[in-house]
Amino acid sequence: MSIRKVARWPFVAALLVLVVSQLLTDRVGWLQSLWWTPRLLLAAFALVGFAMVLAIGWVLRWERAEQWRSAKWTAAAAVVGFACTWGDWGMPKERDPAAFRFAFWNACWMRGEAAPLAVDMILSWNADAILLTDPGSTFSNGGAERFAAAGYSIARPGSFAIVSRVPIVEARPVHEARGQKLARITLETARGPLVIDAVDLPSETTLHRALVMRNFASAIQDIRGDLPDLIAGDFNITRGSASLHEVVGDAVEAFAESGEGWGGTYSRRWPLFAIDQTFVRAPWRPVWSRIVDPGLTRHRAQLVDLVR
């Protein structure tokens, strides 16, 4: 067999994995690890690999048919890679100054000595409401007083916290079992009520995600009540996964819908995985979203502008 054909095999395999995993996402438990392989790395490997083969063929003056095949594979890798990573990046967008700004951040049990820096960062977002998972000592060392001075009130439903400039009508834990957590928060905004479900799901990589979400949806079905306007949290399930629909229903993911920049949230230093997400349901709509580096802990934060 021609060495020219063999040279393309690794990149054909990467492209095949990218396509198959994109179609299946996490529906099949023993194949879900393929879906978790960062889309960006698979797409870049295939595209750069085919481009290198094309360049080598041009330098070594391969037959025109071989060069043409390499060019077609390179073009296919570019198209497939672009399509499979479409929801993970976005172009700059105009801000709506009248929008309601929401922020979510998994603070990962913030330590007391880092709390002042965390408060500095949160206040810099200028959000109307901030949802925190595992806030830890965020409000220590004068943090609560600084939020109050900036016009925020604080409520702590279970392992979450809501920091809000608008009235907090309700903030209560709903469910906590087997590492699955849910809290219901209702805010009274100038645009009408905003109902938020805060979610935190297990991080064990061996868990069958589709099964976890089915069990979670079943556990909260009778105690959750009506579907909320927002579902936000650390799902430990990457953006675009089929299993997410078990809990978020017809909601759209804010970054995939209206994001700008790169959409990865974990890890903070190398954000290849989009596991921290905000889902929005009508009558609310996301019009802008950005993932920001808070400079602390393991997760990046998500900012979302909402209109109703």
Image (tube, rainbow, N blue to C red):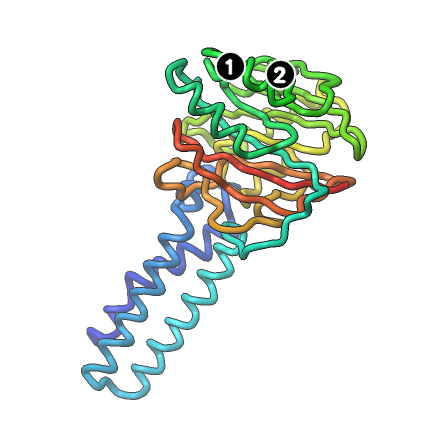
Residue 175 in percent (x, y) is at 62, 16
Above or below: residue 143 compared with residue 206: above
Q: Residue 304 carries which label?
A: none
Residue 22 in percent (x, y) is at 49, 52
The structure residue drawn at horizontal position 60% and vertical position 18%, both measured from the top left corner, is 149
- Name the amino acid, label 1: Phe
- Name the amino acid, label 2: Ile
Q: Is residue 74 or residue 283 the one in the foreground?
A: 283
Residue to which mark 1 is pinned: 139
The structure residue drawn at horizontal position 54% and vertical position 44%, both measured from the top left corner, is 290
Q: How many labels does the image show?
A: 2
User: From where the camera sits, is residue 1 visible?
Assistant: no
Above or below: residue 157 compared with residue 288: above
The structure residue drawn at horizontal position 52% and vertical position 56%, both measured from the top left corner, is 86
Residue 228 in percent (x, y) is at 72, 30
Above or below: residue 55 compared with residue 258: below
Relative to 129, is 78 on the left or the right?
A: left
CB contact under 8 Å: marks 2 and 1: yes
Give the quarter of the figure containing the C terminus: top right
User: From where the camera sits, is residue 124 visible?
Assistant: yes
Give the quarter of the figure containing the N terminus: bottom left
Q: Distance between the residues labelled 2 and 1?
A: 9 Å
Residue 269 in percent (x, y) is at 35, 38
Residue to which mark 2 is pinned: 154
Which residue is the extreme one toward the front? Answer: 149
Q: What element carries label 2?
A: strand
Q: Is residue 159 or residue 301 the one in the foreground?
A: 301
Categorize mark 1 by other alpha carbons within 10 Å: few (<14), some (14-19), many (20+): many
Lower position in the chain sequence, tag 2 or tag 1: 1
Categorize mark 2 by other alpha carbons within 10 Å: few (<14), some (14-19), many (20+): some
